[in-house]
Amino acid sequence: MQVFEVPSDFRAFMQQVVAYLDVPIDDKHLDASDALRDECGYGGRIDGADTYEFVYLPPEGGTKWIITLKETAIRNIADGFLDEIMAQRQDIAPANADREPRGHPLLIWGEYGDDALCPRDGEQVMLALDSLHSSALEHPVMLRMWTSCDDQLVAVVWGDFCALYVIESPQGYATSRTEHSSSGVFEVNDHDGRPMTVPFADCVPWEVAKRALTNFVGNGELGSELKTDGVIPTMLLVLGEVDRKTVLAQRQEPPRVLERSSLAGALMPQQAPPAQPPQRAIPVHVPADNEHTQPVSIEQVQDVQVVRDTPVPMRVEEQLAWARRLIEHLQSRELIELNGSSNLDEISYQLCGLLQAHGVEAEESLDTANWLANEIGAVRGIKLFATGGDLQIALRRSREP
């Protein structure tokens, strides 16, 4: 046992615990090793009465503290009356130090049994990654991946953006970094429903991330193409305490092929495009024997207007530019207010997925425009005063530069 000097993040954790203990309900979830969780650790009640055991994970990694506390001590720490306690310090050995395969890789992207895959070959891995990318076009999706040697990472995918966080590997922790300076963040819920903030500075293009994920599942390394830092967000340190065997014991057996998973419908086979675009049927006029006909000039053919039934899909850069123009247009009409601390890039990224999925339809449908106005108004940092009709006008006027 050693002296544990209470850090600020653990004190804040104890304050959350006290707040939960004081909630006037009878069915609190307390009697489990991870019933109470925070970015800096986890714990739970161990005697059914008033004794708790917590595991604290320092931000620098490599060690952990096992702390046993009575409820009175928890409250004293939370109130700032207790700064030092006795605890057990342990070094954390890498889970994959021996590099011995322990089965097949594991991918998990949700809380249900079929939100997982235990691929038996590289082809299934590639199909799963492509399907995950397709399912994350509108909303961010979190992926947890274990190799056969228990290397572990977390990937957050949103459209063509992907952030990678290595939790266990021969090289230790790692976070992907973009080559360009990017500001703003977005949120994704982890598999326990807790929000996680992802900076765009951690995101790399999907194609780069896909190659890194393929490398990682094979040998526990992201490859030399990706720029990384040797740190990860504090809240992900807790995930390093849960190995693949423990996760599998808590879930039903994952599918072995993608067709039996929840991602089966995300990647639909596309029909090959026709050799020539379909032509509108033109009635053929057969002239009478005495009818004089004239050739059609090239200029007459060039005057014919071609009308597209379906707009050309926008690239990510175009969608972001549209989102910024929409915000600026609404601001000029005093139909929107942005929180003073909100970043325009962050807001634009959040609107990007909504416009991609519903922007064109909202221009034509008032019901969709009303729905989209409610969704935009629910985005953090936005206060929207526009009606569905106002939004339709703004969408049309801001679509083109």
Image (spheres, rainbow, N blue to C red):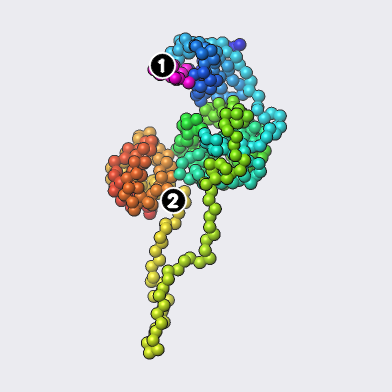
* Residue 311 percent coordinates (x, y): 42, 57
Residue type at the position of mark 2:
Glu
Q: Which mark is residue 22?
A: 1
Q: Position of residue 274 (x, y in %)?
A: 52, 63
Residue 247 in the image: state x and y as whole percent.
59, 30
Q: Give the range drawn in magenta.
A: 14-29
Q: Which amino acid does label 1 sit on?
A: Asp
Q: Most extreme residue toward the bottom, as rendered?
A: 290
Circle 2: is it few (<14), some (14-19), or many (20+) Cα within 10 Å? some
Q: How many labels does the image show?
A: 2
Q: Which of marks 2 and 1 is nearer the N terminus?
A: 1
Residue that appears at 60% across and 31% down: 248
In this view, the mark in front (2 or 1) = 1
Location of residue 155 with respect to 80 vertically, above or below: below
The answer to whether one can see residue 289 in this image is: yes
Q: Can residue 224 be seen in this view?
A: no
Q: Distance between the residues labelled 2 and 1?
A: 50 Å
User: Which residue does the numbered mark 2 point to in the structure image?
Assistant: 318
Q: Toward which corner of the image does residue 21 lie, by quadrant?
A: top left
* Pointers 2 and 1 in contact (C-beta within 8 Å): no
Residue at 53% x, 51% y: name it.
268
Give residue 329's mark. Answer: none
Q: Is mark 1 on a helix, strand or loop?
A: loop
Q: Is residue 195 magenta?
A: no
User: In terms of depth relative to the viewer, which is nearer, 210 or 358?
Assistant: 358
> Looking at this view, is 214 or 342 the one in front?
214
| Badge 1 density bin: few <14, some 14–19, many ≥20, Cα 10 Å | few
Magenta region includes residue 17: yes
Foreground residue among 211 and 401? 211
Residue found at x 66% / y 37%: 104
